[in-house]
Amino acid sequence: MYARTIAHGVTAALAVAFTLAGSQAHAAPAGSGDQPLAARVVTYDASASAEFRSAVDRGAAIWNASVTGVQLRPVTTGQRANIRILADNGWPRALTTSLGNGTVYIGRQAVDQGYDTVRISSHELGHILGLPDRKPGPCTSLMSGSSAGVSCTNPYPNTAEKAEVEGNFGAAAARPAGAPRTVLTVD
């Protein structure tokens, strides 16, 4: 009984923490101790991404196929998005407020210079997932961004970038077997 009370207290504290961080957290029932934790779901709103909407959806799909610790999903009606994605006339950029939360600008300036829209989207989403720029860098590094040149259209994270995102979102997966766990879905 005491252990159950502690588990409920931890669940409540985590829910409050995620709510204060601008997200709603819902505890989901945990399965057996040897099943992997469910991915954290991070929602995005691309309704203001204008002509870049399909590139944004493709960038999210690339991350979803590349990592298991987090999944990017379009926001549903009435839901508050973790990530807002906007089109503007400046240079692409991401303003991260916390891991998995922030605003991405798909800037037309880079597109007008010939940079690939899917690479831009995937790169900027990488910032929201906790990755820094790695400039200068080769085309094989998604986070090398514009330093890889206009001819680089690679929108895929490399092995190290995938591992870093998994580490950012999968720390709970490293818990000892049999330890109490709470699976959170952020939406």
Image (cartoon, rainbow, N blue to C red):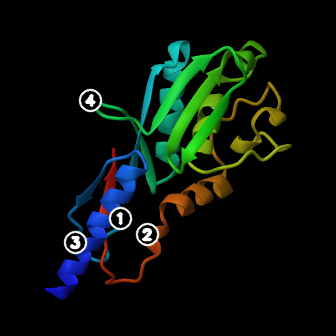
Residue 26 appears anywhere in the view: yes
Horizontally, residue 52 falls left or right of residue 155, namely left
Q: Amino acid at mark 4?
A: Gly
Q: Residue at x 61, y 37 (%)?
A: 95
Helix, strand or loop under label 4: loop
For marks 4 and 2, the one nearer the N-term is 4
Front of the two marks 2 and 1: 2
Q: Are marks 3 and 2 in contact (CB under 8 Å)?
A: no
- Which mark, by number, is residue 172? 2
Mark 3 vs mark 1, CA separation in Å:
18 Å
Q: Which residue is mark 3?
A: 8
- Which quadrant of the view contains residue 28? bottom left
For marks 4 and 1, the one nearer the N-term is 1
Front of the two marks 4 and 1: 4
Front of the two marks 3 and 2: 3
Front one among 11 and 36:
11
Q: Which residue is mark 1?
A: 37
| x and y percentages locating residue 103 in the rendered image | 55, 33
| Vertical arrangement, residue 121 with respect to residue 5, above or below | above
For marks 3 and 4, the one nearer the N-term is 3
Q: Amino acid at mark 3?
A: His
Mark 3 is surrounded, within 10 Å at the Cα level, by few (under 14), some (14 to 19) or many (20 or more) other residues, namely some
| Vertical arrangement, residue 148 with respect to residue 30, above or below | above
Helix, strand or loop under label 1: loop
- Which mark, by number, is residue 78? 4
Helix, strand or loop under label 2: helix
Q: Amino acid at mark 1?
A: Leu
Q: Are marks 3 and 4 in contact (CB under 8 Å)?
A: no
Horizontally, residue 35 falls left or right of residue 155, namely left
Q: Are marks 2 and 1 in contact (CB under 8 Å)?
A: yes
Residue 182 appears anywhere in the view: no
